[in-house]
Image: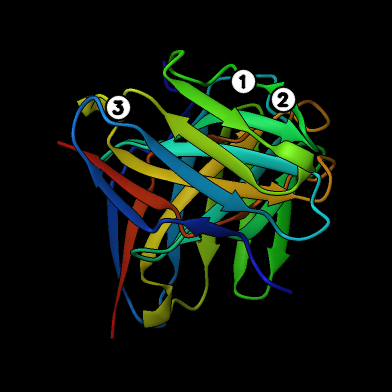
Amino acid sequence: EAGVTQFPSHSVIEKGQTVTLRCDPISGHDNLYWYRRVMGKEIKFLLHFVKESKQDESGMPNNRFLAERTGGTYSTLKVQPAELEDSGVYFCASSRDISYNEQFFGPGTRLTVL
Amino acid sequence: DQQVKQNSPSLSVQEGRISILNCDYTNSMFDYFLWYKKYPAEGPTFLISISSIKDKNEVGRFTVFLNKSAKHLSLHIVPSQPGDSAVYFCAASVAGANSKLTFGKGITLSVRP
């Protein structure tokens, strides 16, 4: 069974540019999560999809961040326009159900905004 | 306000000895706790979990203890092996809710051969 995959693995952009991160969850996993880890700090929740619906987006920092999950399969997270403080590692995770909460994480996308 | 705290940033132990990683939480609503292990340039990997209805869960060399009254949990690794060297994250959630995980900052464990 393939794990959670994320693309790209690294992205370096200038302040003000747009970046789109992609996550492919494990097949059959209805739940998809985005998290972010800023250097040296804890991993923080951004949002949660159940299939194509946003269940909780309370962790999204501001309206420069837009997440979608068309068709309930892969998800994208767009940052537009990017700011310096958006730098960090963005993790995607998926789970089959929320009963026991064992989420499987992808390798992350390291975003650097210059 | 950090709801899950891992106050020790690092721990170094000798191979074969016990590693004890500690975690404290403040939110009484948390009822499910997990430990994740993370190697550089990889995502966190699920290690072991415990529900608040239990006080101990053991899987192989890994045991998690939960003390609800103290809002404290710990991960014991016995015996420690060099391959256990990684960053360990404690995480908590409210089971059955939206299930988002709240993480601590992580502890870097180094196991010396």
Q: Amino acid at mark 1?
A: Glu
Circle 2/circle 1 CB separation < 8 Å:
yes
Quarter of the figure with the N terminus of chain A: bottom right
Q: Residues within 10 Å of mark 2 (few under 14, many from 20)?
A: some
Please, which residue is most extreme toward the front here?
Answer: A17
Q: Does the rendering let one see residue B44? A: no
Q: Residues within 10 Å of mark 3 (few under 14, many from 20)?
A: many
Q: Residues within 10 Å of mark 1 (few under 14, many from 20)?
A: some
Residue located beneath label 2 in the image: A54
Q: Residue at x 44, y 55 (%)?
A: B88
Under circle 2, the secondary element is strand
Mark 1–mark 3 Cα distance, whole angstroms, equals 19 Å
Mark 1 or mark 3: name the one nearer the start of the chain.
1
Residue located beneath label 3 in the image: A82
Q: Amino acid at mark 2?
A: Lys
Give the percent coordinates (x, y) of residue B16.
Answer: 41, 82
Please, which residue is most extreme toward the left here?
Answer: A114
Q: Do the residues marked 2 and 3 share a common chain?
A: yes
Subunit that carries the residue with mark 2:
A
Residue A66 vs residue B12: left or right?
right
In this rendering, the answer to whether A79 lies above or below B38 is above
Circle 2/circle 3 CB separation < 8 Å:
no
Under circle 1, the secondary element is loop
Residue A52 vs residue B12: left or right?
right
Subunit that carries the residue with mark 1:
A
Q: Mark on residue A13?
A: none
Q: Residue at x 72, y 60 (%)?
A: A26
Subunit that carries the residue with mark 3:
A
